[in-house]
Image (cartoon, rainbow, N blue to C red):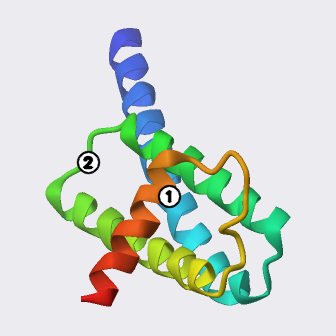
Amino acid sequence: MFFAMVLFVGAMTSCSTKQSAMNQLEDFSIELKNNSENYDLQQWKGALDQFIKIRKKISKHHYTSTERMQIGLTEGRCVGYIASGAKKGAFYNLTGISSEIKGIIDGVMESEAK
């Protein structure tokens, strides 16, 4: 009986953590949508750091194809807001920008130019 309870609690914690990472991404997307137009360089640096941390959390879990699709859509929204900020020149001068995020931004901007 004790073993069954431990497994149940472990499963619930895993799902909660998995869902928590997805929720953080969704909340981050909403934050960018509502406030990123007014970000200064420091706020963009914090936003990029937060995006990287959320993506790392998400990568630690296994998701269904439906969940992966939702994650992809939400990440796409985030990248769109980030690219919009980059077009305005708000944070291109940031030092220490993640190569991964810079690659995402450059890729989005290239595809928009075509």
Residue 43 image position (x, y, % from top left): 80, 67
Dot 1 falls on a residue whose secondary structure is helix
Which residue is painted at 26% across and 60% down in the image? Answer: 67
Q: Quadrant of the C terminus?
A: bottom left
**Tag 1 near tag 2, CB within 8 Å:** no
Q: Is residue 42 above or below residue 81?
A: above
Q: Which numbered disc flags the more N-terminal residue, 1 or 2?
A: 2
Q: Which mark is residue 45?
A: none
In the image, taking residue 72 as reference, residue 92 lies left or right, namely right
Which residue is painted at 28% across and 80% down in the image? Answer: 111
Image quadrant of residue 9?
top left
Residue at numbered disc 1: 102
Residue type, label 2: Tyr
In this rendering, does residue 50 appear at all? yes
Q: Residues within 10 Å of mark 1 (few under 14, many from 20)?
A: some
In the image, taking residue 53 as reference, residue 70 lies left or right, namely left
Residue type, label 1: Lys
Q: CA distance from mark 1 to mark 2?
A: 26 Å
Residue 4 image position (x, y, % from top left): 33, 18
Q: Nearer the viewer, residue 47 or 11?
A: 47
Which residue is painted at 41% across and 57% down in the image? Answer: 103
Residue at numbered disc 2: 63
Q: Nearer the viewer, residue 70 or 101?
A: 101
Which residue is painted at 60% across and 80% down in the image? Answer: 30
Image quadrant of residue 18?
top left
Dot 2 falls on a residue whose secondary structure is loop
Residue 63 image position (x, y, % from top left): 26, 48
Q: Nearer the viewer, residue 62 or 113?
A: 113
